[in-house]
Structure formats: structure tokens, C-alpha cells
Image (spheres, grey):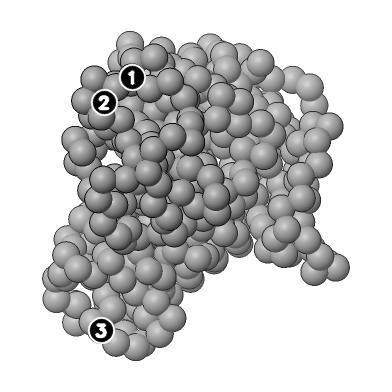
Amino acid sequence: MSTLYLLDPDQPGAAWAPFTNATPLGLLRAGAWRLHERWERALVVPATSGLIAPHAAGTSLSGAPPVIAAADVTGPCWVADATFAPKLPMRAIGGAKRLLHAGRAVAWRLDPGERWSGPHDDGDGMVVDGFPMRGSFDLITVLEQFLFADTILGLEAGSDAIPDGTLVLGNPGAIALRGATLEPGVVLDVQKGAIVLERGVIVRAGTRLEGPLWLREETIVAGGALRGVSAGPHCRLHGEISHSVFSGHANKSHDGFLGHSVVGAWVNLGAGTITSNLKNTYGPIRLDIGTERIETGRTNLGTLFGDHVKTAIGTLLPTGAVIGAGAQLFGAPRAPKHVAPFAWGGDTDETMTLEAFLAVATRVLPRRGVTVDAATRAALTALHARSMR
């Protein structure tokens, strides 16, 4: 099969905040790979041709698969459910027309000339393993369940030699370095899982990395302790980070605990930003989003950060916080449990204007080598417009 399309719900709803109306779900990182990349590996297709994500139309930036209309999809191709994370590797699917999990279809094969008309229950099905996600908080559940196996798969491409001065705890064969630089004094602990460090990753002295862990291209770790992390590309990390996933181009360069959190693209966490990921009662965590209360069933859950969020120094985030895309947190040290998209300060009704957002993005994106051209400005403008609905 030559191509793939990922299908978002028409209206993902509050459970997918802070990415609802802002980010195609296929771009979110589930385990070691973005969701569209997981499906590419599962179905053995070279690339994703498009994301059927009407809630986020126009918001994809350069380099990402485009957001397209469902009417534009014709076979031969696969259409896969973006709320389902397939377990890798997937067994050979033969001539199946549908892939099934727990009695429902999660992917559909279109033959040449066949046009996509929506999810259906027609054709031969094959049962596959994976995780049906109920909302963005389940990106942490997928990380916990799949990152161990993902990093084992990541070892298959081989490794550079481990540099002198690196302290390895466990089997050195569970480490894959591919163009990464490690300063003397770095600790790699692979007793609980493998570690994969890709091209351009730099790990400074005084850093402890505990597997399973995967860092993507050009990510820099400037000290601290990371465990169970999937991050990159182009992230800056420091401090204590536990069981968290980064979409890419995020900056956490300072001290402060980040645990069981989802960090969207282009997030900047000010020095001393701290997340709570466990209630005092050790009870299940609920999300409060507007008038909706969502039961996650999770005991550990930190903060869900939308794309382009910025926090001031000393920001304190409560358990199960949801910070909408583009929000700028400053003022009161303790943030509310839910901060609306493009909030200005976090504890008032004031919002960030489009002009102010574009001005900040024009300064920030070139710092990671991304040119703010007309197409990028259009995508950022669409992000602001949809998030402010």
C-alpha cells in the first residue's frame, strides 16, 4: 500500500484539550513516534499523505503532513484512526480491508479508485493490538505501555561507540547512539529500558538518563535526571523530567520538576516551573475543562501543555492542569487547573491578540532554524483563529 491518511474525530471534544481545534492529533507523539509515524511503521508505508482533521484545518506547519478534506481521499491507501495507537511491530495484514481492536474498526483499506466515504463495517477484518486513546491524557498511558518496546525496536539501526567517560548502568547493548555527543560524566541507566539518542543530540556532564528513553534530533540536555522520556526534535531539557512526552521544539532549560506531562510544540517553561503529578489523596485525577469534568482514571498526571504555551519563572501547576494553546502564564505563581487558549496571564479574561502572537512567533521560530514565511504565518493565524472559538 503506497500511502496513508490519518482520521481525526470531526469534533475531538474537551477530552483532547489542549489540542482540540488547534493541532491535528496525528502530529502528537505517542510513545517514541508521532501518531502518523506509528501508523506508517505499523502498515509499512513510506509516508503519510494527509491528515483528515477538520477541527484543525490550516494549522499544519511546514514539514508536517497537510490537513486535507475527507472528500480528497482516494485509494489505493489506508485511512487510520488517529485516536488509536498501534502496538509495534504489527503482524502482516495480508488482504484485510479493515483492522479491528476490541470489536471496532481502527483502519480501513481503500482499493485503487475507491473514494473515502467515512468509517464503516464492511469487508474482511483482522484484529490488531494497540491502545484506544480516550483523550490527550492517554498519551501518557501509551508512553508507559509502549516506550519500552519502542526503544528496543530503536536498537535495530545500530549504534556508535559509547564514548569514554560515560558511566553505563546495565547492558551497553541497550544503548543506541547515532550521531549524539556525550560529555564525560554522563550516566546512562538501561536497567529498566533501552536508550536511543539521535543525530545532533548533546548531553552535558552531570546528566543522568534512565531508560526507556528516546531523544530526537538536535535535542540538548544540559543536566538533571530524565527517565521514561520521549522528546524532540530540537528540544532543550534540564532538571528532573519523569514519564513525559514532548512534541518538539520545546524549551525546558532550567530546574523544576516535570512529571507525567504532555508538552506541545514550541512550549517554553520558565525557570522553576513545577508540575504536580499526584494528588495528596493518591486518588484518580479529573480534568476540569470549562464546565466539563473528565475522569482520566489515572493516579499520576501532570500538565497537558498546548502548542506555543509560555510560563513565567516560578510557575506552579496543579495536578491534571490543562493549558490551552498559546497561553502566556504569569502573575499568580499557582496556575488554575484549566487555562484557556491564548490567555494573557492565566488568571484573568484577557487574551493574547493575533498580532502579539505573531510577533512572538517571529522571534522564537527562527531560533530553531524555522523561517516565518507567508505559509507559516497563515498556519499560525489559523491556529489562533480556531483556538479562540
What separation in Å lies between label 1 and label 2 (alpha carbons)?
A: 6 Å
Which label is found at residue 172? Answer: 3
Which residue corresponds to the image point at 34% horizontal and 15% vertical from the top-left?
72
Residue at the location (71% across, 46% down)?
Answer: 321
| Of the two numbered discs 3 and 1 in the rendering, the one whose residue sits closer to the viewer | 1
Q: Which residue type does callout 3 highlight?
A: Pro
Q: Three-letter amino acid code at disc 1?
A: Arg
Q: Label 2 near label 1: C-beta < 8 Å?
A: yes
Q: Is residue 301 above or below residue 292?
A: below
Q: Who comes first in sequence, dot 1 or dot 2?
A: 2
The three-letter code of the residue at mark 2 reads: Gly
Query: Foreground mark, 2 or 3?
Result: 2
**Badge 1 is on which residue?**
115
Q: Which residue is drawn at 60% across and 61% down?
A: 259
Q: In this view, does 196 lie to the left or right of 270?
A: left
Query: Measured from the top left, where is residue 162 in percent x and y?
Result: 19, 77
Measured as percent of width and height from the top left, residue 264 is found at 50, 41
- Residue at mark 2: 75
Q: Residues within 10 Å of mark 2 (few under 14, many from 20)?
A: some
Q: The C terminus is located in which quarter? A: top right
Task: Please state the horizontal and vertical placement of residue 284, each as a whole percent of the image.
Answer: 78, 61
Question: As displayed, is residue 183 above or below residue 201?
Answer: below
